[in-house]
Amino acid sequence: MNSSYLIYKLFAFELDSAEYKNIYSNTFYYLFIPMNKAKIAISLDNSLLKLVDSRVDGSIMRSRSQAIEYFLKKGLQEQSVSTAVLLLKGEHQAFALKEIKGLSLIKQQINFFSNYGIKNLYIVTQHTKNINMLLDEISNAKINVEIVEKRARGNAEALSAVKDKVDNNFIVMSGDTYNNFDLLKMVKKHMESEKLATMGLMTREKPSSYGTAILDGDLIVDFQEKPKHYSTNIVNAGIYIFKPEIFELFKDISSLEKDLFPKLAKLKQLIGFFTYGEYVHVGV
């Protein structure tokens, strides 16, 4: 996505039909940015440049460069993912406290999300005797971490506890898994697909302990839940990206794996992404 197109996406709601027709005459100018900022040269359509100039009021927005920088930054933030959710069963809190590569699993998970720009992490779990130890582990986290207690019949019902806390694309990960891969590539794939959900995938020689996914290109079209006889080695990696509209499908759904994902597959709204990284299912 180039800068000109991104600015169009941000301003387009204010363009009328006449302005849309006038997009072929380009103007070329230098964007000077003071201090330690870089000087760049970009070309913009005349109609877009006029729209940029209309936002320059001489007080809050003092120049073209400031206006373009502001809306580019705003647009890039909208194209990123800043919220993640860990679904951690109460009985699995001991796994979250287990050491993986010198740190507890929960700290590894927090570091993973922090390294890829996540700002807010919600841990959906239940109150147990281990809850205070869990609170201690997250007390000095680099990002904002909040525990949400929710008694639920399944992980989809547990996820619904954060429905009012997310208003943009968000990541969900199983609380008893260690993942380490390039999360930004998965986010990029999700944004480009414009589907409701993206599922992290991996391959296993013996997938009978996992749910296997049937693909048509990148589109997941069917599932086999822990099959005895399997036709594919592609399995669920326990990490997903959802649009917030996903909650509109949560009626009569308690399990992500058994209820939601098959429904998304039938609707052709589920894309697969191969994580190609480290994975440990700590609960196994």
Image (cartoon, rainbow, N blue to C red):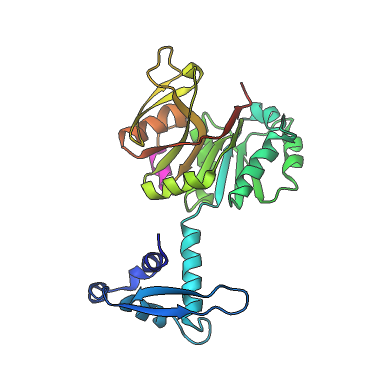
- x and y percentages locating residue 186 in the rendered image: 48, 43
Which residue does the image show at 51% across and 66% down from the upper left?
73
In front here: 235 or 169? 235
Q: Is residue 220 above or below residue 40?
A: above
- x and y percentages locating residue 20 in the rendered image: 26, 72
Q: Is residue 77 above or below residue 97?
A: below
Magenta span: helix, strand or loop, mainly? helix
Which residue does the image show at 50% across and 71% down from the upper left?
70
- x and y percentages locating residue 208 in the rendered image: 48, 16
Q: Is residue 104 left or right of residue 228?
A: right
Q: Is residue 75 left or right of residue 104?
A: left
| Residue 20 in view here | yes
Q: Is residue 243 magenta?
A: no
Q: Is residue 249 magenta?
A: yes
Q: Residue furthest bottom?
A: 58
| Residue 254 in view here | no
Q: Is residue 19 above or below residue 179?
A: below
In front here: 26 or 251? 26
Q: Quadrant of residue 179?
A: top right
Q: Quadrant of residue 9?
A: bottom left
Total label count?
0
Q: Is residue 189 above or below residue 132?
A: below
| Quadrant the C terminus occupies | top right
**Magenta stretch bounds:** 244-250
| Quadrant the N terminus occupies | bottom left
Which residue does the image show at 37% across and 30% down from the upper left?
262
Which residue does the image show at 40% across and 64% down from the upper left?
6
